[in-house]
Amino acid sequence: MFDFTRRTLLSASFALGAALATTLPAAADQTIKVGVMSGAEEDVAQVVKKVAATKGLTVQLVPFSDYALVNEALARGDLDANAFQHKPYLDAQIAARGYKIVPVGFTFVQPIGLYSKKVKAVADLPKGAKVGIPNDPSNGGRALNLLAAQGLIKLKDGKGLSPSLLDIAENPKGIQFSALDAAQLPRALPDLDAAVINTDHAVNAGLDIRKDTIAVEKREGNPYANFIAARQGDENRAEVKTFVASYQSPEVSAFLDTRFKGAIIPAW
């Protein structure tokens, strides 16, 4: 009697387990699709991808060459996250396009620099110098703030991180500004007296922030720290959290130091 009951219970338990195994959904693959800028930032993301693999997360990197396309792809659902921007840029994109995108973890800071192939110091810029700046609102404003910090121009009060060319109150050298797509500035540099160039584009073009700049943005307390972003509501997805942890890892910090030697530094 006891043996029969035991065998019956075991058989019933096995049958129930088999039924549950066939009706419960299989665990979802831990995979995330992330948009990054091609070149130096993609090189960093490749290291992150390797770290993430050790944590059970498959990272599919989608490289872009145009800043303006990355948030659109995330908002549209073509990406799960992106890693390429700072807060002033995202704020400008949200104001213009209404994206529901939020920061989820810091990555690195790329201090922006004023590059020149024609002069060795800011004071050497001639009257009427031709200076290139990025043509998007956030990076253009960042460039103007760098020039103002060097005393080349004076901006109207209260313009914060996003001044425009219309906000220049004083221009004692009569600088002539060329507002160009950020990716075009390295190629335009030989035709300009100087240009404010985003570090990723400068590195991709073979420029050295230590040797080719005549001014560099401050590093400490820099408001332009880059971050990983996701759609609002996805902040606590396991894949997003694992990707952030993989980025903010000793392996990535060591790679930044070795590969970029101060041009790109951790922000976490």
Image (spheres, rainbow, N blue to C red):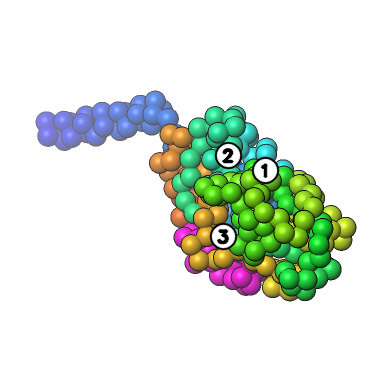
Structural distance between the alpha carbons of marks 3 and 1: 28 Å
Quick one: label 1, few (<14), some, or many (20+) residues within 10 Å?
few
Instruction: Answer with mark 2 or mark 3, whichever residue precedes in sequence.
Output: 2
Span shown in magenta: 247-268
Instruction: Answer with mark 2 or mark 1, whichever residue precedes in sequence.
Output: 2
User: Disc 3 vs disc 1: which is toward the camera?
Assistant: 1
Q: Is residue 174 magenta?
A: no
> Mark 1 falls on what kind of element?
helix
Kindly tell me whether residue 69 is visible in this rendering.
yes
Amino acid residing under circle 1: Leu
Q: Which residue is mark 3?
A: 109
Looking at this view, is 46 or 91 the one in front?
91
> Mark 3 falls on what kind of element?
strand
Amino acid residing under circle 2: Ala
Amino acid residing under circle 3: Val
| Residue 266 point in image, percent of width and height | 53, 63
